Image (cartoon, helix red, strand yellow):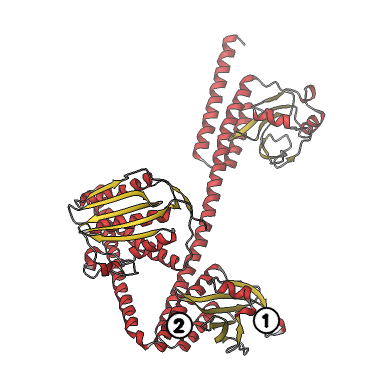
């Protein structure tokens, strides 16, 4: 064969090789099925190289390996599925393969291979061996191996280069498939997590409904005995427990008496008493409003049921601890988090009901005050109903309008100004609804003393401008002037940044809401008396001294203001006061000369807790 003929033949072979690599690369881009890609690859490579066997060898974590794919001629034994642990395969071999080493062996019996390696290859009927590493994500994943069994074979450079190109593509396929598998595993995990979360939420909603039902029943009466009976029966039936009882303290909290019990058996403890001092470890925690769950031996039970699981939740309100709600179930059944929360909320409602019943029975002189509380409750329900209904109506109307735009105008409707305007209404209404719910929840958590502070050093000179910025457009649209002032250098304060942000946002929201056009809103920060004074002022509004005393009460609204004009639930400033107190700070209100100023006094030094 002439040199020219040989060159043409090599060029043709190279062109076919390039075509093979391109075809495999295209298949990798079009499929995530690694096994199918590998099977087709070894089949086409064996045919192209005209050799006896081509296989893919995958490493295990201990550097043993498994032949996962094979294409072999009919005359030779199959080695697919063989698991190989080569004692001659050392860490130095691993490192060399990681660096891209290619092993080219024309004749295994006339080579530098170790005897154990030669023995292993001979058992597979191999005479010549060509090994190229498969690297995926910079890790040695496996080997692509071409083997000649009928005789020794000299592997030429173009064949080696072809296999190197193919292993690059196989490495991409491995990386792609493993990434897809990780994504699938993550999706499965997230789906399972969502399912668990959904089940938990459904159960939580069910418990909330039960709490409302129990609350309605015990609020419908001022008879303390009926309240105790309702609570114990409802709790026992809802949680399917053996026994539920309520004990109440005397006025000095030295004696605890079981005043009502609901049980599935004849054992009854109603009327029994015990001294609090005789059980200091138990009652010390209960009097600190901490729920307890433990397994206890109960002598009065049958011999088969000497032990049980107890859950004890204190019955308390803001005036103190009245008693405890006791629950009993078998020792192998614990009360989960949702059940504990349910019982705690029932205990809280029970405390309210008992307190109301006692007030009614023991203090007829407080009837007028009770009437005020009922009026306050009614006003709050009306206000909160309006505040909840207004954004919900806007959300419903916006959703209907958006749906109509999409149906009638298709994609064009999504880009129209009407769509954007209605969508903004939808977002604003959702944000308003979410804020109201968050305020209510936060107020509940603070009242239950379950809020947790995360203190850090805060630079007010950078925090305040960031918080004020979202209000600038609103102030501009309402023709108001918004000013920030730092008369002097402000030291860092040690506080909870998220709670502080909520306080400042609430004060700015009120200022923007009540300041008339052409009015001025000022945020001034200064150092005074060893503290940082943060003031939010607005002009055009003045609160009378009598109203200033009530402005921080829950659900209180200034009578002179139209509740439907400005909106609001009456919990914003109550929440501000509680958050400020939680931060170990003070809040002061000044309102005169048609200017209202709220000032927060923040300690500079860290608070020792």
- Which residue is situated farthest in the front direction here? 529
Q: CA distance from mark 2 to mark 1?
A: 29 Å
* Image coordinates for residue 87, horizontal then vertical, percent: 79, 35
Quarter of image, res 402:
bottom left
Determine if residue 425 is in view: yes
The residue wearing badge 2 is 354
The residue at the point 26 percent across, 70 percent down is 546
Image side of residue 231 versus residue 566, left or right:
right
**Nearer the observer, 101 or 395:** 395
* Image coordinates for residue 86, horizontal then vertical, percent: 77, 36
Q: Residues within 10 Å of mark 1 (few under 14, many from 20)?
A: few
* Image coordinates for residue 220, horizontal then vertical, percent: 39, 84
Instruction: Name the disc covering residue 298, or none.
Output: 1
The residue at the point 79 percent across, 21 percent down is 110
The residue at the point 34 percent across, 69 percent down is 553
The residue at the point 50 percent across, 86 percent down is 229
Image side of residue 497 versus residue 589, left or right:
right
Helix, strand or loop at disc 1? loop
Q: Residues within 10 Å of mark 2 (few under 14, many from 20)?
A: many
Position of 295 relative to 26 (above/below): below
Helix, strand or loop at disc 2? helix
The quarter of the picture where the N terminus appears is top right
Position of 552 relative to 242 (above/below): above
Going from N to C along the chain, the mark reached first, 2 or 1, is 1
Q: How many marks?
A: 2
Quarter of image, res 12:
top right
The nearer-to-camera label among 2 and 1 is 2
**Nearer the observer, 473 or 431:** 473
Position of 548 relative to 427 (above/below): below
Determine if residue 407 is in view: no
- Which residue is situated farthest in the right direction here? 115
* Image coordinates for residue 434, horizontal then vertical, percent: 36, 60
């Amino acid at each position: 064969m002439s040199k020219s003929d040989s060159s043409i033949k090599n060029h043709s072979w190279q062109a076919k090789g390039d075509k093979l690599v391109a075809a495999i690369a295209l298949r990798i881009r079009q499929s995530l099925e690694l096994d199918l890609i590998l099977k087709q690859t070894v089949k086409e490579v064996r045919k192209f190289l005209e050799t006896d066997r081509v296989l893919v060898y995958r490493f295990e974590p201990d550097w043993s390996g498994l032949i996962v794919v094979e294409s072999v001629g009919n005359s030779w034994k199959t080695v697919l599925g063989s698991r190989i642990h080569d004692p001659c395969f050392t860490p130095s071999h691993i490192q060399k393969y990681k660096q891209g080493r290619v092993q080219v062996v024309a004749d295994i019996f006339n080579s530098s291979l170790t005897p154990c390696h030669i023995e292993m290859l001979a058992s597979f009927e191999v005479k010549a061996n060509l090994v190229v590493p498969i690297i995926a994500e910079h890790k040695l994943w496996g080997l692509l191996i071409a083997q000649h069994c009928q005789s020794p074979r000299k592997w030429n450079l173009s064949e080696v280069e072809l296999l190197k190109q193919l292993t690059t593509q196989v490495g991409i396929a491995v990386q792609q498939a493993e990434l897809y598998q990780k994504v699938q595993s993550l999706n499965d995990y997230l789906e399972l997590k969502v399912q668990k979360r959904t089940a938990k939420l459904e159960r939580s909603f069910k418990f909330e409904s039960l709490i409302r039902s129990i609350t309605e029943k015990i609020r419908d009466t001022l008879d303390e005995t009926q309240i105790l009976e309702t609570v114990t029966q409802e709790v026992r039936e809802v949680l399917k427990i053996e026994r539920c009882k309520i004990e109440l303290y005397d006025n000095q909290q030295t004696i605890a008496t079981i005043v009502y019990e609901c049980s599935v058996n004849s054992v009854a403890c109603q009327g029994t008493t015990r001294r609090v001092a005789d059980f200091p470890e138990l009652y010390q925690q209960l009097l600190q409003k901490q729920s307890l769950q433990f397994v206890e031996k109960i002598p009065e039970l049958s011999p088969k049921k000497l032990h049980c699981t107890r859950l004890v939740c204190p019955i308390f309100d803001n005036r103190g601890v009245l008693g405890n709600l006791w629950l009993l179930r078998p020792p192998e059944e614990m009360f989960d988090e949702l059940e504990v929360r349910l019982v705690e909320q029932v205990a809280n409602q029970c405390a309210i009901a008992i307190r109301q019943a006692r007030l009614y029975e023991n203090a007829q002189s407080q009837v007028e005050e009770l009437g005020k509380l009922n009026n306050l409750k009614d006003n709050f329900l009306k206000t909160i109903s309006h505040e909840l209904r207004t954004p919900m109506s806007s959300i419903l109307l916006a959703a209907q309008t958006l749906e109509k735009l999409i149906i009638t105008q298709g994609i064009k409707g999504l880009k129209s100004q009407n769509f954007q305007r209605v969508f903004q209404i939808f977002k604003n209404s959702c944000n308003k609804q979410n804020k109201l719910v968050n305020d209510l929840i936060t107020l509940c958590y603070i009242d239950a003393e379950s809020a947790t502070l995360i203190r850090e050093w805060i630079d007010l000179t950078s925090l305040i401008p960031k918080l004020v910025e979202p209000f600038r457009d609103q102030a501009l649209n309402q023709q108001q002037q918004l000013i920030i002032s730092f008369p002097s250098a402000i030291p860092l304060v040690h506080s909870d940044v998220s709670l502080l942000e909520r306080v400042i946002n609430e004060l700015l929201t009120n200022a923007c809401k009540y300041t008339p056009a052409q009015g001025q809103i000022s945020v001034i920060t200064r150092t005074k008396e060893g503290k940082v004074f943060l003031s939010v002022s607005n002009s055009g509004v003045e609160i009378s001294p009598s109203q200033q005393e009530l402005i921080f009460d829950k659900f209180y609204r200034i009578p002179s203001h139209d509740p439907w004009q400005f909106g609001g639930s009456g919990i914003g400033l109550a929440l501000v006061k509680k958050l400020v107190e939680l931060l170990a700070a003070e809040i002061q209100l000044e309102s005169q000369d048609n200017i209202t100023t709220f000032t927060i006094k923040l300690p500079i030094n860290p608070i020792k807790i």
